[in-house]
Image (spheres, helix red, strand yellow):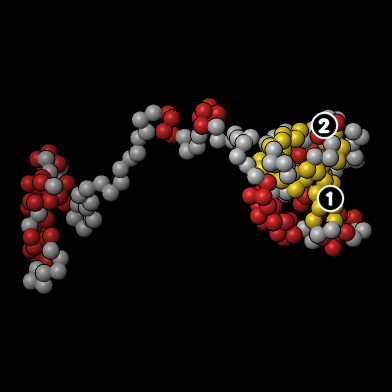
Amino acid sequence: MDLYQKVPQTVKDPSDPHKQKTQKREAVTNFLTECLPSKRISAGAIDMLKGKCIILDSTRKKWKPTSKARCRNSLSARDRRKLKVFDIKKDGHKFEEYIPLHRLWQDYMRDILDIPRYASEVAGQKKENNERLLKADYHGCMIVVGKTRCPSLLGLAGIVLMETRNTFKVITKENKIKCLPKMNTLFSFELDGYVFTIHGNQFCSKPTMRVRKKFKFKGPVDI
């Protein structure tokens, strides 16, 4: 701030109509003569600065992180475990609270699926909608376990609260949280009178990775 105090008032106030160009040049030359080192003045620094825009103060400040932890823009896996970000408490959940989520999911699926077109027998249309099913988001879907190697899970139905790489976490009508494995399990859901069946083996990946993944269509797997 001390440097700015040395600048003449005729230079600091550009709205003054009584300024002349010669006065400006003399004021700037005197200011540079007082502030610049003598070595730079003798080397012709004032002549080199003529006609150039001079920024007296830096408008940018370099950001230097104090530690590696501040460089991350997201939580690490250890921090997520400590904070229990992805843990769902088994108590305190009611099935009725997630019915609006299920209705939102139905509207979402109606937008990405053309059900009358899906029901047609054209192979190209079938393949296109099958790929959409594989890449869709199933949070809020009411799924039913059709076939599984675990007899206790057969026929279990619930709304999907969380999807991980290998499981679906659902809430049942009895207000219980159940964890359903995807591997070797057939799931089904109903939408506008049509029943869709999905193979859990094709969903064994992170939901965010399924969007970019290229699927190879295979035959049904016997369970």
Q: Residue sitting at 8 percent across and 51 percent down?
A: 5
Q: Residue at x 72, y 38 (%)?
A: 168
Q: Who comes first in sequence, dot 2 or dot 1?
A: 2
The residue pinned by badge 2 equals 152
**Mark 1 falls on what kind of element?**
strand
Percent from the top left, x then y, of residue 24?
11, 62
Tell me how far mark 2 sits from mark 1, CA to CA.
22 Å
**Mark 2: few/some/many CA within 10 Å (<14, 14-19, 20+):** few
Which residue is disc 1 drawn over?
196
Q: Nearer the viewer, mark 2 or mark 1?
A: 2
Where's residue 164, x and y in %? 68, 36
- Based on the displayed image, in which of its 4 quarters is residue 143 positioned? top right
Out of 8 and 31, give the one closest to the viewer: 8
161 sits to left or right of 73: right
What is the quadrant of residue 40 in the picture? top left
- Residue 108 lies, in percent from the top left, at 70, 57
Q: Work out which residue is located at the far front of the displayed protein and give it.
A: 174
Q: Is residue 37 left or right of residue 64?
A: left
Pointer 1 local density, CA inside 10 Å: few below 14, some 14–19, many at least 20:
few
Which amino acid does the dot numbered 2 rest on? Ser
The three-letter amino acid code for the residue at tag 1 is Phe
Q: Residue at x 51, y 28 (%)?
A: 82
Q: Nearer the viewer, residue 76 or 101?
A: 101
Does 195 sit above or below residue 144?
below
Look at the picture and state if 26 lies above or below 81: below
